[in-house]
Each structure stands twice: as structure tokens, then as C-alpha cells.
């Protein structure tokens, strides 16, 4: 068999499948941009494009007009660069010691978050004479990466160092934007305004996904959404307006009847409270489906869906198998060979991710 034929057979016989809706990804990027019409909407594509595949995400967004990307690491930047030769790419985790030549080779801009990084970048630029811009990260209350306001003032007062580092963007990051009423949001917005007054000619970037929903005071010049692009909920306890991008489905291998009092799976963790129909599906923790999504009598787990009918996970998540309760699903839908949704249009990814007791299951 040719390699292509083997791949096709593997796809046809896979236990589970992930579908990525790139049109929905692009629609989410446009939707976010429309919420801040005076800003440029960039895209955060760290962690392999939030698990979707950095090249796929960058190519789709670049083709649709996205010109600025943020990655966490230099190697991610190199992968993004291949997918978007013309784009502006910033490396959020900054300038690793000695990494300047790598960044220069791939035309990547470091987000400089400490004085040693600024000094190293300025020295590298002076030594090479190359016109390589950067971004400056100021900390406005998260106490993770970034210069303090005092250091920002010191940089502003040192024109040689400032010109040496050649910043093209001033940025900061919210700690609590997912909770709009949190007082730290207003404090960070005020601190960022102060930083922008210190370095007045630089474009500013403050808003992650949740920051886009905080309104115009948070928007500035460049938006940096991540999770919302991929369909995740950015803001807690409100309806998520984004389109789902990723769907996970697994096939039903068999359906069995279980008598009241019988248990299902390892550890006999779940006991049938009524005559039950159980479908066994072909996905498990070896595929990255977390064991925390399992259930036992006393703790509900995650829920699957078959054409909109809910089917809670019962018992532990095995390595390559999961049991779901299909007692309330019509038999014509819960049968061998049918693909069951674990997250997608019917099960929001944010409901599947934490696997808390939200499924309404009481056993
Ligand atoms: C991850 C990250 C983002 C994107 O955050 P989301 O909450 O996923 O939108 C933006 N800015 C910085 C600095 C980040 O680390």
C-alpha cells in the first residue's frame, strides 16, 4: 500500500476524529476585529495555535488579512514565519539569552520584558546594524512579565537605550479581564495609560480576548485575542458569542444493557441506578481526553451528545475507551458505528474542559 493509501485507511478506521472549522476561526477573528473598529486585530497562536496546529491557523488567518501574530517561543515564531512570510511576528516570552541571532534569522520581534533583555537586544542591534524592531512589555499589575512603571520611566529617560532597542509596540497584559467587574481591570487600564504617556509615540496593545469585551478603554491599537479565535469562552458567566472551531467525535463500538446495581468500567466506579443502556466509544486518555472527565456515583463527569441528545460519561475514562449512558437517547441514534460528539456545536468546549458537576447527572 502507498503511504497515501495507508493514511486514508487509518483515517477511515480511526476510533475518533477532530474536525477544525477554519471558516469559523476566520469568522471569529473578523467578529473580534469588528468589536474594536479603530484597532488592528492580531492573533495569538502560541501553544501550537492553541492545539489546532500553528501552521494551519497562521496560514488561514494570514490569507484572510491578519498581518500580526504573537507566539510564546522562538521556535514557534520560526514555524509561524514559514506559514506567513510577510507577517509581523512577536515572541511574547521575550529575548532568551543568546537567542537574538535566531530571532533575526527568522525576522521575529522579541517582546522585551526586563532591563537585561532590553540591553541585550540593543547591544545585538548595535553590533549587527540590522533594523530589527521589538516590543516593550510593561507590567500593569499582573506581576508576571514586563517592566515596572519605574523601569519604563527610566527607559523613557534614556533615549540611547530606547533607540537601541527600537520598540515598535508597547504592550501589557490583563490578569482578570475574564471577570469584567474586577477592580484590577480599571487599575491596569489606568497604569497602561500612564505607561503610554511615558513612551508616547508607540502604538499600544493591552487586550487579550476578554479585554476585547471590556470595551474601548481596553482596546488601544492592537488586539491580542487567543482563546476567542478558537471558539472558547473568554468571559465567565455570560453567553459566548464565538463560533465553535473544534469538534471531537468518537465512534460507538457497541451498546449493552446494564441491570440496576451493575457497575461499569475500572474500579466499578459507577453503578447503574436504573435499567440502563451503555454505549462504549473509541476514545480515551491516551488520546488526551482527561481522566478528570470521568464520573462515579456521587460525582458527575463530562457529557457527550448524539444529534443533540445528551449522554453522560459513566465510570472512569479508560486508556482508549469511554462508556456513556444512552438510556435516554433513541435506539436508532445510539448504535454501533455512529460518531458521538464530545465537544463541538452541542457540547461547548468550555463545558467539556473543566469536567465539573455541570451535566445534571446525579449518580
Ligand atoms: C496568551 C496571551 C494572550 C491571549 O490570551 P487569551 O486569553 O487566550 O485571549 C494575549 N497576550 C498575552 C501576553 C498572552 O500571554
Image (cartoon, rainbow, N blue to C red):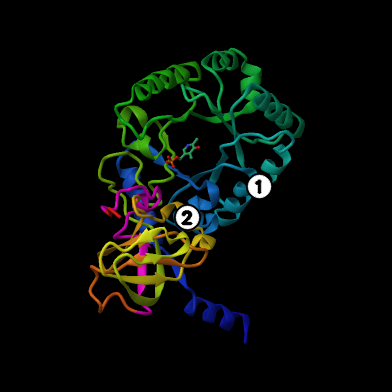
Q: Secondary structure at mark 1?
A: loop
Q: Nearer the viewer, residue 270 or 222?
A: 270
Q: Which mark is residue 106?
A: 1
Q: Quadrant of the C terminus?
A: bottom left
Image position of 359 (left or right of 282): left
Residue at image location 70% in from the left, 31% down from the top? 125
Task: Tell me the crowding category of disc 2: few under 14, some 14 to 19, or many 20 or more residues within 10 angstroms, Cα based.
Answer: some
Q: Earlier in the sequence, mark 2 or mark 1?
A: 1
State whether residue 51 appears in this view.
yes
Report x, y in % for residue 280: 40, 71
Q: Give the residue displayed 30% in from the left and 60% down from the top.
A: 345
Could you say where residue 108 lies in the image, as x and y percent from the top left? 62, 42
Can residue 343 be seen by looking at this rendering?
no
Q: Quadrant of residue 310?
A: bottom left
What secondary structure is found at the residue carrying circle 2? helix
What's drawn in magenta, residue-wise? 336-360
User: Would you say residue 358 sits in the magenta stretch?
Assistant: yes
Mark number, residue 271: none
Which residue is depicted at the point 41% across and 54% down?
A: 293
**Residue 277 versus residue 218 in the image, above or below:** below
Q: Is residue 356 left or right of residue 60?
A: left
Residue 135, position as x, y percentages in the image = 56, 31
Q: Is residue 59 left or right of residue 159?
A: left
Read off the residue under disc 2.
291
Amino acid at each position: 500500500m502507498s503511504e497515501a493509501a495507508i493514511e486514508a485507511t487509518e483515517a477511515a478506521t480511526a476510533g475518533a476524529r477532530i474536525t477544525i472549522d477554519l471558516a469559523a476561526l476566520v469568522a471569529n477573528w473578523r467578529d473580534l476585529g469588528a468589536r474594536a473598529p479603530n484597532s488592528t486585530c492580531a492573533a495569538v497562536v502560541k501553544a501550537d495555535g492553541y492545539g489546532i496546529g500553528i501552521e494551519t491557523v497562521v496560514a488561514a488567518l494570514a490569507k484572510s488579512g491578519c498581518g500580526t501574530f504573537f507566539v510564546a517561543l522562538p521556535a514557534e515564531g520560526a514555524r509561524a514565519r514559514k506559514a506567513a512570510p510577510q507577517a509581523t511576528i512577536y515572541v511574547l516570552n521575550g529575548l532568551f539569552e543568546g537567542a537574538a541571532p535566531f530571532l533575526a534569522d527568522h525576522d521575529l520581534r522579541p517582546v522585551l520584558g526586563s532591563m537585561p533583555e532590553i540591553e541585550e537586544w540593543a547591544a545585538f542591534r548595535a553590533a549587527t546594524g540590522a533594523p530589527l524592531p521589538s516590543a516593550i512589555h510593561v507590567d500593569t499589575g499582573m506581576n508576571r512579565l514586563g517592566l515596572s512603571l519605574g523601569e519604563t520611566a527610566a527607559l523613557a529617560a534614556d533615549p540611547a537605550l530606547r533607540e537601541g532597542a527600537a520598540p515598535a509596540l508597547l504592550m501589557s497584559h490583563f490578569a482578570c479581564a475574564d471577570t469584567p467587574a474586577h477592580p484590577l481591570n480599571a487599575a491596569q487600564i489606568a497604569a497602561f495609560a500612564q505607561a503610554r504617556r511615558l513612551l508616547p509615540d508607540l502604538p499600544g496593545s493591552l487586550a487579550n480576548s476578554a479585554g476585547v469585551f471590556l470595551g474601548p478603554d481596553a482596546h488601544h491599537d492592537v488586539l491580542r485575542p487567543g482563546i476567542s479565535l478558537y471558539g472558547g469562552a473568554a468571559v465567565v458567566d455570560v453567553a459566548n458569542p464565538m463560533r465553535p472551531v473544534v469538534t471531537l467525535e468518537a465512534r460507538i463500538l457497541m451498546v449493552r444493557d446494564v441491570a440496576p446495581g451493575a457497575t461499569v468500567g475500572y474500579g466499578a466506579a459507577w453503578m447503574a441506578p436504573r435499567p440502563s443502556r451503555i454505549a462504549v466509544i473509541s476514545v480515551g486518555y491516551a488520546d488526551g481526553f482527561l481522566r478528570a472527565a470521568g464520573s462515579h456515583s456521587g460525582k458527575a463527569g463530562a457529557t457527550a451528545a448524539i444529534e443533540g441528545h445528551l449522554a453522560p460519561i459513566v465510570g472512569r475514562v479508560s486508556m482508549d475507551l469511554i462508556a456513556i449512558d444512552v438510556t435516554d437517547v433513541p435506539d436508532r441514534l445510539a448504535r454501533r458505528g455512529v460518531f458521538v460528539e464530545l465537544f463541538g456545536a452541542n457540547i461547548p468546549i468550555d463545558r467539556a474542559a473543566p469536567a465539573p458537576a455541570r451535566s445534571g447527572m446525579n449518580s
